[in-house]
Image: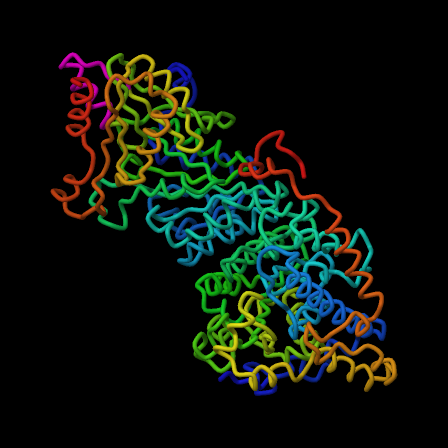
């Protein structure tokens, strides 16, 4: 049903940097290796959660980011530590990927630790929100991550407010929001982006177009061939990136980040990808009702890890045998094993999971705390 | 709060001037405060509540927004997340429904969800209330929606002194406050009075006894307070002495003042211009049933709007709304039980 072509003509010029060098060309070799490692990390984290969920260890719904990791890694890699992000339900890895390049175990980086993120997923007191709302509904003023709700695109007006407020202070920070293509039909998406465009706010709007909004295909939610075409209504650039290619995502989003930081205003970057599983793990079985196996296979054919590896081999950063050493690509969560991932990736996630398992639940009486801000209220 | 204290400072102000003065003072006092709303800058607000703010504080802090209520509230949330205090105007409180999700699901729950990390000093204010022929979409009192959403404080002043003092308190509270202004009272001459000075507030959560009496307690807020006071005058001639309580704050609710009055009168009538079913008068009666049942000598009575929208033309509008006669009738009923 859906058009899976990620290489079709973009809404704006395919390469907005024109005759300048593409942003990724100035990445150092260690950055390129780090980007591949972050892809491994995001994939392994997701796979681990799928397994934990199937074993009944986790409450709530898992929205898998499988096959969409290049969007998270590529978009976040171009940010400065002090920039803000607003992830959505499918972006669980984004909470620890933010500013990860400042050091995976660096306690001063402006992103969440793997321990905090796992404590949240396991519903433990060490979660940044003390497990009051579930899964992706966490944030942190200190870590500059906007708290989301289940009402998709409701973060867009909030992001506009943060961007406005930051700029008024003379700050150089920008705000990067993630949304699915389905959420772009909501009024909040329009109201937020309209205001951001009127005021030329430093905001980048990344659309993870995975072709399916729960059980509704793209063409029933968006009348234009590209979601990025919505940008035309606001007179702002709307770019289209190959969401399977981490470097294409990096290039396009990074261009938008620089554009925002230079004071030119907001942008939309549509990253075209495909949702590997059901909407949530509750939907994995029923997803066959609305998607054919052929369509799913085609959507998952171009694994972002494989594409990244090929690029590194082409560039001479990675030898072929190194690239072949760990091969999670093309494998589903039930097929893939720990040995398919670099040991430091497995160890890192294990640290988070073990911390979460060992951690206590919040005390029941906390349920009544923090409804209102009061003098002398408990400090988390 | 004595009348002497109220009249000690400043010139007399009407309800609208009192609100305007509060905004000017708080904007001057707090350089981190931002005002957002439709037509609040160049025009000075549809009614003039924000008059003079743009010229004095500039377009960066006084923002004329597009017609986007969800954006107004959502951006206020973002600004508060970044550390600001925000006044967000709804041009009419009826239009608040367009920003409802951002208020009840985002703003109201933010402090809770962030486990106390982030507070939301955001005041959403706007003109409310019927009796002026505003019809269905310029007459609403939808305060119950917000009283029913944990995390929001809800206030509704009936006079200039409280309008200024409560608005200043709301802007310093650190919690989201939904602020119901009664547009029919904005320019009413007979209400003009001295108002709090720059450093004074009226605390949120405290009711005021507007008239003392021993036979029946009338509990209300907003413009229905004046229907209650007029009914009390009428009943006085009939030998019934009514006490009138102006709640001022709905969340939190001043139960102590209500119960102290009931201990004296043993009879109660609650009046609100919102519709009957699940209206705030019902909540007041529920609290009384739980906490003050022993005080009661007669079944309590509500006087509310009928469970209809507010119709446009005068005969229809008057038919559905509380008025002095309906309030007096209810008092006679509970007093003759």
Outermost residue on the front side: it is A55
Q: Quadrant of the C terminus of chain A?
A: top right
Task: Identify the image quadrant of residue B269.
Answer: top left
The residue at 38%/29% (across/down) is B248
Classify residue B152 as left or right of residue A208.
left
Q: Position of residue B266 (x, y in %)?
A: 28, 16
Task: Identify the image quadrant of residue A84.
Answer: bottom right
Q: Is residue B52 visible?
A: no
The residue at 41%/20% (across/down) is B256
Q: Position of residue B227 (x, y in %)?
A: 22, 28
The residue at 38%/49% (across/down) is B96
Between B68 and A122, the one lying in front of the other is A122
Classify residue A18 as left or right of residue A30.
left
- Residue A354 drawn above or below residue B278: below
In the rendered image, residue B99 lying in the magenta stretch gets the answer: no
Q: Which residues are magenta?
A: B227-243
Outermost residue on the left side: it is B315
Q: Position of residue B321 (x, y in %)?
A: 20, 38
Q: Position of residue B225 (x, y in %)?
A: 28, 27
Colouring convention used in this rendered image of the protein = rainbow
Classify residue A4 as left or right of residue B301.
right
Count of numbered tags = 0
Q: Is residue A128 visible?
A: yes
Between B40 and A196, the one lying in front of the other is A196
Between B261 and A20, the one lying in front of the other is B261
Classify residue A224 as left or right of residue A333.
left
Majority secondary structure in the magenta region: helix
- Residue A182 drawn above or below residue B63: below
The residue at 84%/65% (across/down) is A344
């Amino acid at each position: 049903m859906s058009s899976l072509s990620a290489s079709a003509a973009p809404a704006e010029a395919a390469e907005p940097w024109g005759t300048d060098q593409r942003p990724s060309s100035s990445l150092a070799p260690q950055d390129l290796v780090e980007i591949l490692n972050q892809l491994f990390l995001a994939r392994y984290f997701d796979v681990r959660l799928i397994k934990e969920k199937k074993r009944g260890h986790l409450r709530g719904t898992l929205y898998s980011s499988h096959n969409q990791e290049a969007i998270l890694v590529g978009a976040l890699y171009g940010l400065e530590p002090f920039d803000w992000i607003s992830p959505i339900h499918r972006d669980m890895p984004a909470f620890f990927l933010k500013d990860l390049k400042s050091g995976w175990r660096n306690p001063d980086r402006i992103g969440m630790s793997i321990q905090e993120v796992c404590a949240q997923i396991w519903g433990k007191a060490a979660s940044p929100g003390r497990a009051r709302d579930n899964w992706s509904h966490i944030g942190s003023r200190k870590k500059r991550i906007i708290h989301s709700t289940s009402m998709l695109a409701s973060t867009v007006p909030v992001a506009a407010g943060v961007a406005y407020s930051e700029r008024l202070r003379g700050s150089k920070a920008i705000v990067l929001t993630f949304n699915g293509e389905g959420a772009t039909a909501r009024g909040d998406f329009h109201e937020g982006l309209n205001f951001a465009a009127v005021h030329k706010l430093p905001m980048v709007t990344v659309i993870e177009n995975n072709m399916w909004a729960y059980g509704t295909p793209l063409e029933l939610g968006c009348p234009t061939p590209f979601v990025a075409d919505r940008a035309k209504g606001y007179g702002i650039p709307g770019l289209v990136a190959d969401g399977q290619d981490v470097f294409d995502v990096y290039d396009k989003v990074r261009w938008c980040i620089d554009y925002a930081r230079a004071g030119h205003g907001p942008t939309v970057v549509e990253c075209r990808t495909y949702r590997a599983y059901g909407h949530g793990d509750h939907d994995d079985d029923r997803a066959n009702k609305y998607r054919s196996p052929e369509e799913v296979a085609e959507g998952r054919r171009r694994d972002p890890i494989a594409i990244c590896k090929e690029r590194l081999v082409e560039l001479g950063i990675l030898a072929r045998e190194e690239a072949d050493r760990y091969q999670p690509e093309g494998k589903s969560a039930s097929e893939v094993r720990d040995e398919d991932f670099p040991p430091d990736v497995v160890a890192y996630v294990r640290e988070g999971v073990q911390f979460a398992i060992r951690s206590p639940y919040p005390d029941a009486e906390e349920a009544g705390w923090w409804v209102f801000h009061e003098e002398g209220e408990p400090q988390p | 709060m004595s009348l002497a204290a109220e009249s000690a400072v400043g010139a007399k102000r009407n309800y609208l001037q009192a609100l305007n003065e509060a905004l000017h003072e708080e904007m001057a006092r707090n350089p981190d405060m931002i005002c957002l709303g439709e037509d609040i800058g160049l025009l000075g607000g549809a009614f003039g509540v924000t008059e003079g703010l743009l010229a004095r504080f500039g377009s960066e802090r006084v923002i004329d927004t597009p017609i986007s209520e969800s954006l107004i509230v959502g951006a206020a949330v973002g600004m508060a997340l970044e550390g600001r205090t925000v006044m967000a105007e709804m041009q009419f409180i009826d239009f608040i429904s367009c920003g409802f999700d951002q208020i009840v699901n985002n703003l109201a729950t933010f402090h809770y969800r962030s486990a106390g990390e982030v507070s939301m000093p955001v005041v959403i204010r706007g003109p409310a209330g019927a009796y002026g022929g505003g019809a269905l979409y310029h007459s609403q009192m939808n305060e119950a929606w917000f009283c029913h959403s944990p995390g929001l404080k809800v206030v509704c002043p009936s006079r200039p002194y409280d309008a200024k003092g409560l608005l200043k308190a709301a802007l310093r509270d650190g919690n989201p406050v939904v602020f119901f202004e009664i547009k029919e009272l904005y320019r009413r001459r007979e209400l003009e009075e001295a108002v709090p000075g720059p450093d004074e507030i009226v605390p949120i959560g405290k009711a005021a006894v507007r008239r003392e009496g021993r036979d029946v307690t009338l509990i209300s807020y907003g413009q229905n307070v004046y229907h209650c006071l007029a009914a009390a005058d009428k009943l006085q001639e009939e030998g019934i002495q009514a006490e009138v309580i102006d709640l001022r704050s709905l969340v939190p609710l001043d139960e102590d003042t209500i119960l102290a009055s009931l201990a004296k009168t043993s009879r109660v009538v609650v009046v609100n211009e919102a519709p009957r079913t699940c209206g705030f008068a019902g909540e007041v009666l529920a609290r009384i049933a739980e906490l003050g049942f022993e005080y009661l000598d007669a079944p309590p009575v509500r006087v509310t709007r009928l469970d209809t929208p507010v119709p446009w033309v005068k005969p229809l509008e008057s038919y559905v709304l509380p008025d002095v006669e309906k309030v007096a009738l209810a008092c006679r009923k509970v007093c003759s039980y």
